[in-house]
Image (cartoon, grey):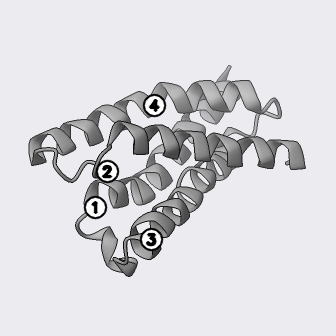
Amino acid sequence: MTAKKHAFLLIYSFVTWFAFYLIGLPDYYQSWPFWLKVAICILVTAAYFPVTRYSLRKYWDNGEHFRNSLWFALYLTLPLFVYDYLLLGWHFGLGIGFVKPYWYLTFFYFSFWLQFPYVGWQLQQREAAA
């Protein structure tokens, strides 16, 4: 993967994190009721199926959708974890313990590692069969 694509994915991850942070103001979703946090997790997960398919087709043209989905998962989990840690763990002094009260953030650190490779694998299988 080119340095340009790495830079793009890093910017993409920051913009994604910042958008979710702004939506969650003033307390990064902590004042939202439990049912709404669950609903948001479900909606974001559902929305990322077509986003992943679109992104894998648009930003990579090598047909290696599964491998590319791993890059996509990496850039939408590790940097977001780092941003969350810097904000919640370091700035607000919660340390790594932020993962429990902010469980709805933690959910995506893991779910994208299941969801994105699954979408990439599906795309690769469909194209191989065609």
Q: Which residue is mark 3?
A: 91
- The amino acid beneath tag 4 is Phe
Q: Nearer the viewer, mark 3 or mark 4?
A: 3
What separation in Å lies between label 1 and label 3 (alpha carbons)?
15 Å
Q: Nearer the viewer, mark 3 or mark 2?
A: 3
Q: Is residue 130 left or right of residue 31?
A: right
Please determine whether, in this image, residue 18 is positioned above or below residue 56: below
Work out whether residue 40 can be spotted: yes
Q: Nearer the viewer, mark 1 or mark 3?
A: 3
Secondary element at image label 1: loop
Secondary element at image label 3: helix
What separation in Å lies between label 3 and label 2 (alpha carbons)?
13 Å
Q: Which residue is mark 2?
A: 28
| Quarter placement of the C terminus | top right
Say which quarter of the image contains residue 61: top right
Please determine whether, in this image, residue 4 is positioned above or below residue 63: below
CB within 8 Å, label 4 to label 1: no
Q: Which residue is mark 1?
A: 102
Q: Which residue is mark 4?
A: 49
Secondary element at image label 4: helix
CB within 8 Å, label 3 to label 4: no
Pointer 3 or 2: first along the chain: 2
CB within 8 Å, label 1 to label 3: no
Pointer 2 or 4: first along the chain: 2
